[in-house]
């Protein structure tokens, strides 16, 4: 497995848009470098021309974190597996490699990441830069699985960091928000490919919330969805299995993943957007549509599924012990408001990690995520939920809609000053700044 060597492309610019369609930008220049040297060259030339620099992944962030009016570095040619080290049990990949390509390549080698989020469209650098996570009792975000990182800093230097080499950079740059440099390669810890058994089961809101601590403690990966306007939830428990593999049958997979989670869900959401008054009645039916099922498969096939219905999302990390109280407050708020919400609220967990600006930095966390169908006004709902989350000391996902600024975030993250001091050292002229980073980092 090696990277095909191509040379950098500079192209005429067009409007850049994110996946959700709520952020667009008009970069002054675009380039698709094919190597770390070409990235360094592009950064130096941008500095000479007084342009700010931003590298985009696949635009799956809902915030303007990847937007720029300066030089946009596209990841298309920075892809591929550099090396697999079976002694160290690591894989080194080019930073623009989509997670789906990494997952498939690892599976072919009989290897896997330990944990991942619920889709695999993002690039490895895009996903890790904002702290993309799945759910886990013992295993944390994708960035927490990084063992070494290579990045081009503002003066064009290629810097490698790990626990041993430049450890102060490693402590922050694994979730660097694109603020510390352009990541060119990432080395992840891997393990022998294993099997996960998924058990999906509807459960009443009162039962999930009453039993949350046990459900969390008894499962390696527990998550659930609550359907607003109903007392219904769907739960998902993933645990390692000795096998044999028993993937969902083709028909069952199509019904659950395509028809109910995408096709029909799209129709239901479009109807709800046109006639919001129908949403509570539809929610009562649709929350019961998904039935209990179990299946066993390799990790990425269990963790991830296609998400074709477009939406806008906000997600907050809370101290895990605050999760149930906060979720009950969200439910009470929705019940007494005129809001009509057609998307389920998602609850996941993560263990504490050691990354400065990880949403789980230094604390056991639970995540509460709210979504609105694309094109539906989301401000009133998100504002009301955000008020609840911030009252519980919540930390917003860096890639999902929120209104927090540097003052709030400095209070929410004990190691905020460590990150900004490193930024001052690596990027004193703010080559990698944009409006979003000015708001959240100052
Ligand atoms: C349908 C959907 C499902 C999602 N599911 C999850 C989930 O399960 N869990 C979760 O936590 N999040 C989830 N997200 C959010 C998503 O994972 C993050 O927003 C992620 O950052 C997007 O990655 P991307 O490749 O699209 O990067 P972008 O959104 O394009 O960029 C994100 C940031 O990374 C920076 N960046 C990208 N490449 C580089 C580089 N080479 N060097 C330096 N900086 C770089 C960008 O500048 C920007 O700051 C989901 C989003 C969508 C739309």
Image (spheres, helix red, strand yellow):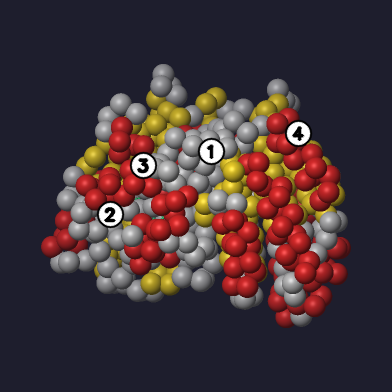
- In the displayed structure, does residue 143 sit left or right of residue 54? right
- Badge 4: few (under 14), some or many (20 or more) residues near its Cα, within 10 Å? few
Q: Secondary structure at mark 3?
A: helix
Mark sitting on residue 214 = 4
Pinpoint residue 381: horizontal percent, then vertical percent.
Answer: 65, 69
Residue 386's place in the image compared with 189, above or below, is below
Mark sitting on residue 33 = 2
- Residue at mark 3 to residue at mark 4: CA–CA distance: 33 Å
Q: Nearer the viewer, mark 4 or mark 2?
A: 4
- Residue at mark 3 to residue at mark 1: CA–CA distance: 16 Å
Mark sitting on residue 197 = none
Which comes before the other along the chain, label 3 or label 2? 2
- Residue at mark 2 to residue at mark 1: CA–CA distance: 38 Å
Q: Is residue 34 visible?
A: no
For the residue pair 272 and 218, the one nearer the viewer reads as 218
Which comes before the other along the chain, label 1 or label 4? 4
Residue 197's place in the image compared with 269, above or below, is above
Pinpoint residue 246: horizontal percent, then vertical percent.
Answer: 75, 34
Residue contact at pointers 3 and 2, CB within 8 angstroms: no
Q: Secondary structure at mark 1?
A: loop
Q: Residue at x 83, y 54 (%)?
A: 232
What residue would you read off at disc 1?
Answer: 363
Q: Nearer the viewer, mark 3 or mark 2?
A: 3
- Residue at mark 4 to residue at mark 2: CA–CA distance: 49 Å
* Residue 12 location, quadrant: bottom left
- Badge 2: few (under 14), some or many (20 or more) residues near its Cα, within 10 Å? many
| Quadrant (top left/top right/bottom left/bottom right) for the N terminus | top left
């Amino acid at each position: 497995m090696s990277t095909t060597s191509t040379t950098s492309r500079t192209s005429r610019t067009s409007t850049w848009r994110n996946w959700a369609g709520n952020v667009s930008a008009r970069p002054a220049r675009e380039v698709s470098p094919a190597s770390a040297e070409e990235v360094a060259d592009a950064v130096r030339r941008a500095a000479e021309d007084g342009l700010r620099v931003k590298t985009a992944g696949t635009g799956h962030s809902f915030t303007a974190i990847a937007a720029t009016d300066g030089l946009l570095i596209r990841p298309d040619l920075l892809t591929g597996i550099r090396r697999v080290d079976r002694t160290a049990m690591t894989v080194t990949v080019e930073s623009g490699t989509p997670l789906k390509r990494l997952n498939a390549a690892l599976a072919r080698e009989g290897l896997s990441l330990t944990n991942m989020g619920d889709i695999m469209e993002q690039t490895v650098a895009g996903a890790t830069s904002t702290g993309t996570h799945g759910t886990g009792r013992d295993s944390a975000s994708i960035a927490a699985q990084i063992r070494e990182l290579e990045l081009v800093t503002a003066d064009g230097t290629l810097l490698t960091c790990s626990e041993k080499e430049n450890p102060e950079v490693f402590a922050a740059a694994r979730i660097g928000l694109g603020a510390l440099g352009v990541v060119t390669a990432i080395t992840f810890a891997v393990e022998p490919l294993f099997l996960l058994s998924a058990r999906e089961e509807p459960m009443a809101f009162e039962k999930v919330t009453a039993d949350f601590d046990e459900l969390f403690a008894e499962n390696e990966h527990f998550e659930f969805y609550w359907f607003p306007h109903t007392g219904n939830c769907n739960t998902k428990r993933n645990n390692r299995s000795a096998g044999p593999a028993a993937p969902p049958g083709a028909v069952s997979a199509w019904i659950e993943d395509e028809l109910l989670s995408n096709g029909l869900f799209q129709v239901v959401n479009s109807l709800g957007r046109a006639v919001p008054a129908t949403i509570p009645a539809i929610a009562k039916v649709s929350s019961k549509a998904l039935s209990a099922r179990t299946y066993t498969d390799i990790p990425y096939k269990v963790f991830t599924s296609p998400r074709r219905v477009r939406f806008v999302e906000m997600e907050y990390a809370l101290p895990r012990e605050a999760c149930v109280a906060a979720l009950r407050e969200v439910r009470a708020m929705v019940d007494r408001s005129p809001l009509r919400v057609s998307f389920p609220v998602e609850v996941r967990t993560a263990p504490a990690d050691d990354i400065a600006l990880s949403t789980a930095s230094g604390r056991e966390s639970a995540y509460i995520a709210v979504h609105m169908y694309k094109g539906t006004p989301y401000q009133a709902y998100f504002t009301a939920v955000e008020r609840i989350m911030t009252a519980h000391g919540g930390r917003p996902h860096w890639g999902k809609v929120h209104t927090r600024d540097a003052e709030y975030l400095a209070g929410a993250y004990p190691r905020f000053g460590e990150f900004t001091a490193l930024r001052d050292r690596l990027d004193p002229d703010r080559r990698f700044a944009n409006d979003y980073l000015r708001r959240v980092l100052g």
